[in-house]
Every structure is written in structure tokens, then in C-alpha cells.
Image: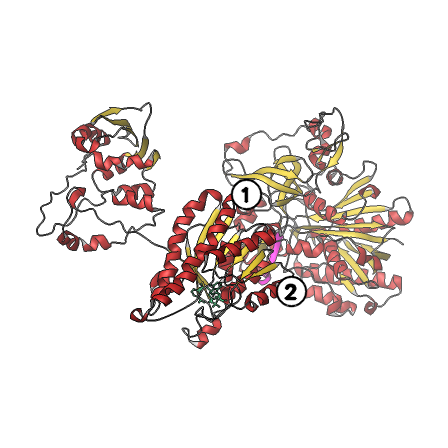
Amino acid sequence: MIGITSYGTYIPRLRLDRMAIFQSMGWFAPAIMMVAQGERSMCNWDEDSITMAVTAARDCLIGKDKSTVDALYLASTTLPFADRQNAGIVSTALNLRDEIITTDFTASQRVGTTAMVTALDAIKGGDRKNILVAASDRRETKSAYFYEMWYGDGAAAIMLGNTDVIAEYKGSYSLSYDFVDHYRGRLNKYDYVWEERWARDEGYSKIIPQAIQGVLDQAGLKIDQVDKLVYPCFFKAEHKKIAKKLGAKPEQVMDNLHEVCGETGCAHALVMLTDALEKAKPGQRLIVAGFGQGCNALLFEVTDNITKLAPRSGFTGAMNNKQSIDNYPKFMKFRDIIETEMGIRAEAPTQIAMTTLWRKRKMLLGLVGGKCRECGTQQFPKMDICVNPNCNAHHSQDDHEFADIPAKINSYTGDLLAVSIDPPHKYGMVQFEGGGRFMADFTDCELEDLQVGLPVQMVFRRRLEDKERGFSAYFWKATPVPGAAEILNRVKYDDQVAIITGAGGGLGRIYALELARRGAKIVVNDLGGSRDGSGGGSTSAADVVVNEIKELGGEAVANYDNVATVEGGENIVKSAIDTFGRVDIVINNAGILRDKSFTKMTPENWKAVLDVHLNGAYHVTRPAFTHMKAQGYGRIIMTTSAAGLYGNFGQTNYSAAKLALVGLMNTLKIEGAKYNIKINTVAPLAASRLTEDIMPPDLFAKMKPEFVAPMVLYLASDKCDESGAIFNAGMGYYNRAAFYTGPGIALGKGKEPPTPEDIKANWDAINEMEGAQEVSDANAAIVALISPPDPKPKKSAAADDASPEAASTLTPKDVFDKMPDQFKKDAAAGVDVVFQYVISGSNGGDWYVTVKDQTCDVQAGKADQATCTLKMKDSDFVDMVSGKLNPMQAFTSGKLAISGDVMKSQLIEKLFSMK
Ligand code: NAD
């Protein structure tokens, strides 16, 4: 039995939305709107017929022994070389044997099927057993043309042979006419197309049915005995008409793929055939016909072997791996339809030395490196000495193919200065599994798609085009494995242990289930009990959730301790360590309510609520923090509430406890920072027994805890770098809540305490929130307070305040000249500092100020050893010393950079009266 033994498909990842062509060029050619549906495939700038053929052939060779291939036929009408065998490049890239026949089939749209018939004849003749046919086309058209819409780029490969046949060859029928619907002159880039109506009526509609009928008659079959008819025809109506003429039902006809990729030239019959084979069942009959100066029609019958074919990208994989674009100028640039300025760097010589290409052909075209016979070390490129320092054997390397070895990104960059048709030029270090690495270009991706550790695969691409000499040079590049980024970026918690307090119901239960689903091992803490925390604890709440997790296939342990006690907190953490050996996540979630208006708030109710919420978080977090510090990793979530953040009638105890948790977080974030412990706070809004009587019933129904959980899960993951933030979360809505501090005003010049009247007079300025900032910690807040921000306080009736002096003509040099006069000797007792100023700008320069033994010395230049260095622009510096720019704002906005002993810089305000 002979026939098809394997297949592979390649459609470039880029798909141009046809409406983008119309939107750009519809003003010129409105009629192209008629065929502007869907997308057409388009080559990346570094793809051509050869690279696409290699990729389709690699897909076809999956699960096959390359050494059994006896011939490679490459079919294309868009081959880069008119006299250098293109099939030879494909064969070298695939690392096929040298002792095979390679040849190009070209100059007609039906060469894909011609190559198949020729291959089958050779196999039938018995001289060759396995022949790989790869068909590939990247046709060019003028802009704003129907054919630009109809055409697409793509490739397919079909392996024909006599073992493991998946579709048995039952015969073929060929017609050869010199029918010229279009032609491309030897020196022309574009097709010359004759009248469409004539091509349709006299060509497609007559010749395709004639060839298909021919193969049916030859096999003694009727059209209804064939399951699928495969024949490209980009004229939609004609495609249907041909089936009708043959008496075939519409369901027998394979789609011409206009909407999803367009017609891929001489590869299209084979691309459509791979679609048919992927859907075919054993026993079905297929006819594939290729039109062009006649027609070839081939009949196949699918065998059981089709179910045993190794998994591959195939037609579906090729279709699904796509990036839709609507950038028509990009399409034109990639195809050299528009000429852009590439800069003088692009003029660097590109000539390729044929001697080097011949000597290093395996490395350059086949990505063949070396593997040491002595120690097994893989390396690229292959060298005379093994790179393994423990081996260093000489001449010990065997050829080793790297193209199919899984690899990951070790480092990457985007280079805007390097010459690139699709900037930035993306390249970096690629590490192969099992050893070996090299600096690779990245293709078929955006810079944002790249990340360290991302799995990549190697693809054969055009490295450069020497237009002057008409030479395309090829090499291998790396591209992200389809779908790998999604897997890599998945938030997961494999081998992590999470403690969730109060997880026997409500929000905590959902956190526990979701974390367990994503791999975390859970300590489900809940003492049971009623909403107000009264009543004896019950173990059932935690047990139920543990069972639910186990039913999901997860791991969990129940804990019934009371978070409100020191021992309770310690036991909860102990149960994590005893059961799972570590603790990575703590979600402080346990809670009760005892609402009463303030006068009725008994000490008992006050204390009970603070004990569970605030003290509970302290009791659990403290022992967990010790483990997290030791392991250098931790994620802690506090649970606050809108009542705490904003206030709520009747909840003084609850509000106080809930906002106290934010205070706890604010300091813990600082203490945890250097141990990679991130602490954040969530203010949930969800339906639970704590909210059932506060919410209107219809709203209550919409408030599933599942809408809060994603935020908590993210904050609990290693993907989260945030620390010290508060987030509201509920009903699918998430936002950040934060404390902002206004710019404020300094009164009394920092010398005299201002009067209450001054406060009253400056109330608006004190309340001003424009320019308000978040303050990172208490030290930063103190810096803000001791830096007088406003030179123009309003005078109270009683106050006698001097107006600030004009500063418009002041330069930094003036400021430093005046500095010794403004030195406050009395404030300098015991002070020993050197302030280095580095002022940029046209009036800038370096000055340093030495304060020692209650004296002040100002010098131009650099100090030998400065206590701290202040860097600023000249204008900002003048603004700051003349009071127009608040030093704190200057610091937080980056206008003032301070290095060295930052705290000592705050003495400047004390030591000098600058106004
Ligand atoms: P819930 O009553 O359903 O869950 C709280 C759980 O904590 C209960 O299972 C309870 O048994 C347990 N618990 C109480 N005291 C405990 C203790 N001392 N030790 C161990 N477990 C104890 O309530 P919920 O709505 O899921 O609330 C969870 C957290 O979210 C609480 O901290 C609550 O204050 C906060 N919160 C909830 C909402 C909301 O809209 N549901 C709004 C703001 C804040």
C-alpha cells in the first residue's frame, strides 16, 4: 500500500484584518470592500517560502524517522533563488541525509499536487520509499487589489510512502493545458491577471470538474462515494458552483479558508488537504485537486493508521497560533511595498561568504551543535574542546541537533538602536534543556511577551537579505512556545502552605477552596460558633471545608483553635508546621460582630471584637512571621472593612479593630521587606452571615465571596510584589484605598509657635489636598513636617510676619555665597557634617558645606568625604531655598536626590535660615 504517511501545516502567526486594507485604501479602491471579510495570513518580515516550508516539514516529520526520507520535493512559485536549489536549503535545515534527491517544483499554481503525483509515481516505481513534499507560497500583489485580499501566505508538507499509510493512494488524473488566467514574468514581482470572468468560466469551472470527474471515472466511483472534495478556488460563488456541477453536496466540499487565511498559492490544495485529513475518519475517501495550467486530481482512502499519528500542530494548531493585526502599513513594510529610511547602520555590508556557509552549513542551517562522547555535555556551537571544565576532552564531540530541544529564555533585551524591520530588535540568551545555550534573536513576539524562564522553540528564519546580490541568509531564531506564557504566568501555589483563619464558612471557605484548587496545602482554622462569637466552638465548620478540599484532590488539615488567644494563634501555626512543614501564606480572616451604638457599647463587646480581629491577627501572624523570616518568603493578608476605613454607625468596636489592622500592616510591611514578606489588606464586600442583615436582599444575592477571592489569591501569590496596600474588593469591582497627606503649610517660620488664630487664618492651606502624596513611612512623614513648605502663610490679624523676599534673580552661587551669613551657630552645637551639593543646569556646579565646632565653611568643588550628597537642578534648587518648592515634595517627586546619610540632610533646615 502506498499513500500519505504524515502531514504538517504552517500558517504564519500574523493575520491581517482585511478591513484594515479597506480602511487604508478603500478611498482609492472602494470595490475591495466586497471581499474584505475575515483575515489573511501574512509572513513576518523574516519569513519566506523556504522558512515556511521548513516549519511545515518539521511538523510533518513529528514521530517519523528522518533518516528514512529518500527525497525532498519543494513546490513554490515564490522561491528566493532562481538558480540555487531551494529544496537543498530546506533539506539542510531539516538535517535530512545527504544521499537523497532534492528538487524544486515551480512555475504553476498546481505544482503542490504535481509534486505529490510525481512522488507517488516514484514510490510506486519502487526506487524510493519515502518522499517529503513541502509546498509553500508567499505571493506579492500590488496594493489595494482584490488579489491582495484573496491571497494569504502559508505552507503544508505531505509525506508519501509505503509504510504506516494514513491515506491510501487510489490513483490520480491530470490535465495539462496552457490556460493562462494569470502569469508572472521572470523579472516581475507581481502577477499579471487576465479578466476574472473568463478565468472563472473557462478555467476553474470547467477544468477542475473535468479533472475530478476523470479520477472518479478512472476509479469507477460516483461523486456520492467520496466524503470530502478538496479544491482551492478563491472565487466564492465559483467554489460552490464547481461542487454543484459535479453533483456534490455542500457538506462534501472543504472550505476554501478565505476568511481565516486566504489562498496560500501552490500550497493551498495541500493546506486544505491537511484540514481534511485532520477531520477524516478511517474508511473515508478524499479527492484533492490542484488547478493551474490544467489540473491534477488525486484520490485517497483514509486508513486506521490516521488514529495513530503522533500529535502535532497540524492545521488546527497553525490556525490557532495567531496574532491578529490591523496595521496595514506594517504589512506593506514587511513586504517591501513601502520603503522606509533604515538609517546608515543598515548600510553595513551584508555579503555572505560562501566558503563559511559551506563549512558551517550544519551549524548555520541545521542548528547542529556538539555533544561530548566522554561526558555527554551538550554545547552550541560544536568545538574541538569540551566546555565541561571537568572533562575538556579533545575532538570528542558528535553532531547534536538543537532545533527540537526545548529551551527557555535566560535573558533578553529590546534594542531600539539596532537595525530592525520590526523594532525593537529583540534578542537574548536562550538556554537549552540538558545544556547548551546561545544568543538568539526573538521573533513572532512583542517585547512585552518575553520574560526570563519563558519556554521558547527554535524556528528557521531569514537572518538578512543582501538585496544588492540577491541573497537571502537564514539562521535559527527563538519564539515563545504557543500558550507557554499563560502557563508560566498562572497564579499557583504548588508546595505552598496557607493558613486561613475563620475558614469554616463565608469568605474564608472560598479562599481555602480556591487556594487548594491551585495547589496550596491549607490549614482550615475555625472554632465554629455564632456570629457574635458566643457559644461553644464546633469542629464541624472546619471539618466540612477540609472534606470539600479533599474531594477536590487537595490537601488540608482542620484546626479549631481560637485566634483570640496567644496559645490559639501558636497552635494554628504549629498545625501548619507539624502537618505540612512550612507556612507561606497567612490570611487573617476570622471575625465576629457585636454592633451597638457607642453609649451602649459595653467593655465586654468592645473587647470581644478587638480580641478576635486585632489580637487574633497578631496571635497568628507573629509565630508565622518567624517562619517566614527564616525561609525568606511570606504573604500575609489582613482583612479590614469599609466600617474601619470610612466608619459605620453602631460599629465603633469593629471599626477600631479593623483600622488597627491597617496600622499593624503599615509597620509589618517595613519589618518584612528584606525577607520578601509582603503584607496587604483587603476590605471585602460579600454576602455572608456577617452582612446578611445589612444588605438589601437583591444586592446580597449578587455578592458572592467568589468575587473577593481573586484579589486575595493574587495578593497571596508569589506573583504579587505589592506590600502595604489596601484594596476594596467585591462584586467584581476592585480599587485601592490609601492615606494621602496634603502639602500643608509651615507657620511661625519654625521658630515661634503659631497662634490658634494663625491656624484659623490658614485653614484652607492646611486642608489643601492638591499635590497630596502617599507617605512611605513615618520617617518620610517627619521629613515632610520639618521642611517648611509654604513661604506665604496668611497673616492673622495679630501676627506680624515678614513677607518673603523675591527670588527670581537668585542663582545657586548667590545662595552658597550667602550661606555663611545665614548659618545659625546656636543650632550647630555638637554637629559635625559635610553637605555636598551637586547642582546641574547652566547655573550649576559643585559646592560643599562643612559644619564643625559651630562654624560653617562653604567651598566650591567636591568634598573628600561628604556626610550626604544632595543633587538638584539649578532652578529647582533656587525654588527650594526661596520657599517656592517644598523640600519634601522635591524629594518625593525626584527633583531632589539625596544619597549618604539621608537623615542628616534634615539638619539643613535647622542650621540655616535661608529666607
Ligand atoms: P463569616 O461569619 O461567614 O466568617 C467568619 C468566620 O470566622 C466564621 O466561620 C467564624 O466561625 C470564624 N471565627 C469567628 N471567631 C473566631 C475565632 N475567635 N477563632 C477562629 N475562628 C473564628 O464572615 P465573613 O463575611 O466571611 O467575614 C470574613 C472576614 O471578612 C471577617 O474578618 C469580616 O470582618 C471581614 N469582612 C467581611 C465583609 C463582608 O462583606 N462579608 C465586609 C468587610 C469585612
Q: Of marks 1 and 2, which one's residue comes earlier in the chain?
A: 1
Query: Magenta region: which residues?
Result: 34-41
Q: Tell me the residue at 25%/24% (across/down).
A: 859
Tell whether position 524 is magenta. Answer: no
Residue 733 in sight from this viewpoint: yes
Label 1 near ligand 1 (CB < 8 Å): no
Asked which secondary structure carries label 1, the reply is loop
Q: Where is the N terminus found, in terms of image quarters?
A: bottom right
User: Residue under circle 2?
Assistant: 551
Q: Tell me the residue at 45%/68% (across/down).
A: 533
Q: Amino acid at mark 1?
A: Asp
Mark 1 neighbour class, 10 Å CA radius: few under 14, some 14 to 19, many 20 or more: some
Q: How is the image coloured?
A: secondary structure
Q: Nearer the viewer, residue 710 or 3?
A: 710
User: Residue under circle 1?
Assistant: 422
Residue 303 in sight from this viewpoint: no
Q: Nearer the viewer, residue 99 or 517?
A: 517
Q: Is residue 38 above or below residue 464?
A: below
